[in-house]
Image (tube, rainbow, N blue to C red):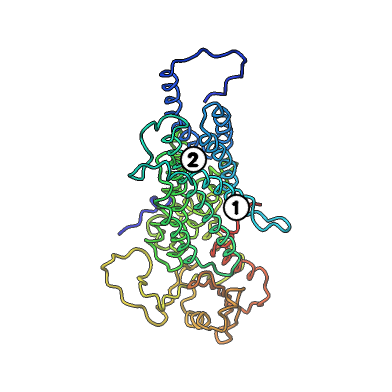
C-alpha cells in the first residue's frame, strides 16, 4: 500500500423605558396569549445565547443574558430571571476557562483558582434551581405539557428547572476537565510523560459525559465539549502510537484530530469556507481563546514529530524537495530533519540516528504500513534495534553492536533520561553520545574521533532535541504566560 504524503499533510431587544403612563387594559384571553408567546421565546433566547458560547463570543453572551434578565423582571417568572443570571455568570467563567486562566499561578494562601470556585458557586446555584424539578414532573417523569408555554406556570418553570439540572452536569464536566488539565501540566514537569494514564483519564471523562447535558437547547456547548475531548483523545493516542513506532495508527489519529479541528473551526466561523492544512499559520495574532489555539499548536508539533519518526516511509513517496516543502509548512512546529542535517554538518558527526527497541513489543511489524494479516517474523538480535531515522543513511551500521550494548546497559537508564551519556570506544576510535527520547527510542550521535564528554554544543543539541521530541514543552505551554 502506497502512502500518499499529500493526505498526511492536509492535515432581544432592550427593555422599554419605564413610564408612568398606565398601559391599556387587555382582555384575559389577550394576556394569556401574550404570556404564551413570551414563554415560547425562551428556548430561542437560550439557544441564541448558547450559540454565542459555541463561537467563543462570551462577552456578547453575557451582555445579552443580562439584558434578557432585566427584561424578565416584568414577566413574573423568578426561575427564568435566575436562570438568565446564571447564564450571564457562566459566560464570564467559560471565557476564563477557554483562556486557561485556571492554570495561572495561585495567589498567596489561595487554595483554589477563581475559575474552579466560580464553577462550584454556579453549580450550587443551578442545583438549587433544579431541586424542585421533580415536583414539576408529570407521571412519566417529563415536564407537564399543560400550560408549558406560559411564563411562571408550573409547566414552564418545570422545563427551566430541567435545563438547570442539565447545566449542573455540564459544570461538573468542566470541573473534571480542569482537574485533567492540571494533571496534564503536572505530568509535563516529569522526565517522561505517562500518556497512557492521561489518555485513560480524558477518555473516561468523555465517555462519562457523552450522555449528559444532552438537551437540544444545550447542543452548542455539548458540541464544543465533545470536540475538545475527542481532539485531546486523538492527540494523546497519536503520541502513544508514535512511541511504539506504529505508522498507520499514528497517522489515523493525527488525521482524526486534524479533521475535528477543521470541523470545529468551520462551526465557529461558518462564513469561512477555507479548510486548513496540517501546517496552518492562521493562529498568528488570532483572537481565538488560548485553549483552542493550543490544540492546533499541539497537533502541529505532533505532526512534525511524526514526519521525523516516519521520514523514511514518507520520503519514498516524494522527492526530498517536496518533503522539505511539506515539512516547512508546519507553522510553529519544528523541521527536525533540517535541524539534524545542519547539526551533522557543523559538528562533523559520522551519524545521527534514532534507535527503536523492538525487543518485547508483541505487535511490532517494522517500518511503514503492513496488512493486518501479513505474517511478520519476530526480529532477533541486532535486528530488534532498527534505526527509525538515520542521517546520513546507514553510516553507523558497523558500530551497531556497540550502540546496542550501550542502550541495553541498564546502569545508564536514569542517566539517559536526565541527560546525555557519552562513551569512547578505544578499539575503533569512535565517540558515542546517547539520550533517551521516548520509552523505547534513543537518539545516538557518532563521531569518528575522541570527543570531550563536556562538549556543550553537542550535548546541548542532543538534549534539547530529546526534550522537544518528548513534547513536554508542548504541554508546559498550556500554562498562560
Q: Is residue 11 visible?
A: no
Q: Earlier in the sequence, mark 1 or mark 2?
A: 2
Who is closer to the viewer here, 481 or 418?
481
Rendered view: 4 above or below 439 = above
Q: Give me the C-alpha separation between circle 1 and circle 2.
A: 20 Å
Rendered view: 424 above or below 74 = below
Report the number of discs: 2
Residue shown at 47%/48% (left/top)? 225
Q: Is residue 477 visible?
A: yes
Q: Is residue 105 left or right of residue 54?
A: right
Who is closer to the viewer here, 324 or 60?
60
Q: Is residue 476 left or right of residue 47?
A: right
Rendered view: 187 above or below 25 = below
Q: Secondary structure at mark 1?
A: helix
Query: Which numbered mark, 1 or 2, is in the foreground of this view?
Result: 1
**Which residue is identified by label 1?**
116
Q: Are marks 1 and 2 in contact (CB under 8 Å)?
A: no
Res. 85 image quadrant: top right
Taking the view exactly as shown, the residue that stands out farthest to the bottom is 427
Q: Position of residue 362 (x, y in %)?
A: 36, 75
Q: Secondary structure at mark 2?
A: helix
Few, some or many residues within 10 Å of mark 1 (<14, 14–19, 20+): some
**Which residue is identified by label 2?**
54
Q: Position of residue 147 (x, y in %)?
A: 39, 31
Locate the N terminus by quadrant: bottom left
Amino acid at each position: 500500500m502506497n502512502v500518499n504524503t499529500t493526505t498526511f499533510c492536509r492535515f432581544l431587544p432592550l427593555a422599554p423605558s419605564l413610564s408612568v403612563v398606565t398601559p391599556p387594559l387587555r382582555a384575559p384571553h389577550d394576556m394569556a396569549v401574550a404570556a404564551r408567546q413570551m414563554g415560547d421565546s425562551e428556548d430561542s433566547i437560550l439557544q441564541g445565547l448558547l450559540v454565542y458560547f459555541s463561537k467563543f463570543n462570551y462577552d456578547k453572551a453575557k451582555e445579552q443574558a443580562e439584558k434578557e434578565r432585566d427584561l424578565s423582571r416584568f414577566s413574573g417568572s423568578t426561575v427564568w430571571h435566575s436562570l438568565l443570571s446564571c447564564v450571564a455568570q457562566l459566560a464570564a467563567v467559560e471565557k476564563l476557562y477557554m483562556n486557561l486562566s485556571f492554570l495561572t499561578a495561585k495567589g498567596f494562601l489561595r487554595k483554589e483558582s477563581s475559575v474552579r470556585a466560580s464553577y462550584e458557586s454556579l453549580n450550587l446555584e443551578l442545583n438549587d434551581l433544579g431541586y424542585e424539578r421533580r415536583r414539576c414532573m408529570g407521571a412519566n417523569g417529563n415536564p407537564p405539557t399543560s400550560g408549558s408555554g406560559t411564563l411562571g406556570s408550573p409547566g414552564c418553570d418545570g422545563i427551566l428547572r430541567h435545563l438547570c439540572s442539565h447545566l449542573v452536569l455540564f459544570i461538573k464536566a468542566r470541573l473534571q476537565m480542569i482537574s485533567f488539565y492540571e494533571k496534564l501540566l503536572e505530568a509535563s514537569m516529569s522526565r517522561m510523560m505517562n500518556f497512557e494514564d492521561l489518555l485513560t483519564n480524558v477518555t473516561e471523562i468523555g465517555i462519562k459525559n457523552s450522555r449528559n447535558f444532552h438537551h437540544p437547547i444545550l447542543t452548542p456547548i455539548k458540541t464544543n465539549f465533545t470536540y475538545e475531548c475527542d481532539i485531546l483523545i486523538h492527540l494523546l493516542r497519536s503520541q502513544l502510537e508514535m512511541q511504539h513506532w506504529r505508522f498507520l495508527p499514528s497517522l489515523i489519529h493525527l488525521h482524526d484530530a486534524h479533521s475535528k479541528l477543521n470541523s470545529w473551526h468551520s462551526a465557529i466561523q461558518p462564513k469561512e469556507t477555507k479548510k486548513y492544512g496540517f501546517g496552518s499559520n492562521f493562529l498568528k495574532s488570532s483572537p481565538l481563546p488560548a485553549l483552542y489555539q493550543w490544540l492546533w499548536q499541539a497537533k502541529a508539533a505532533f505532526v512534525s514529530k511524526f514526519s521525523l519518526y516516519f521520514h523514511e516511509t514518507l520520503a519514498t513517496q516524494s522527492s526530498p524537495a517536496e518533503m522539505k516543502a511539506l515539512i516547512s509548512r508546519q507553522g510553529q512546529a519544528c523541521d527536525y530533519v533540517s535541524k539534524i542535517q545542519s547539526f551533522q554538518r557543523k559538528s562533523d558527526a559520522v551519524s545521527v540516528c534514532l534507535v527503536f527497541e523492538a525487543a518485547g513489543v508483541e505487535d511490532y511489524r517494522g517500518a511503514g504500513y503492513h496488512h493486518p494479516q501479513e505474517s511478520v517474523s519476530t526480529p532477533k538480535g541486532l535486528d530488534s534495534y532498527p534505526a527509525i531515522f538515520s542521517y546520513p543513511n546507514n553510516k553507523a551500521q558497523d558500530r551497531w553492536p556497540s550502540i546496542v550494548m550501550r542502550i541495553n546497559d541498564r546502569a545508564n537508564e536514569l542517566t539517559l533520561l536526565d541527560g546525555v551519556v557519552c562513551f569512547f570506544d578505544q578499539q575503533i576510535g569512535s565517540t558515542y553520545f546517547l539520550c533517551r527520547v521516548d520509552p523505547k527510542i534513543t537518539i545516538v550521535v557518532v563521531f569518528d574521533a575522541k570527543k570531550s564528554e563536556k562538549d556543550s554544543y553537542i550535548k546541548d543539541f542532543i538534549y534539547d532535541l530529546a526534550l522537544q521530541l518528548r513534547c513536554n514543552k508542548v504541554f508546559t505551554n498550556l500554562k498562560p504566560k
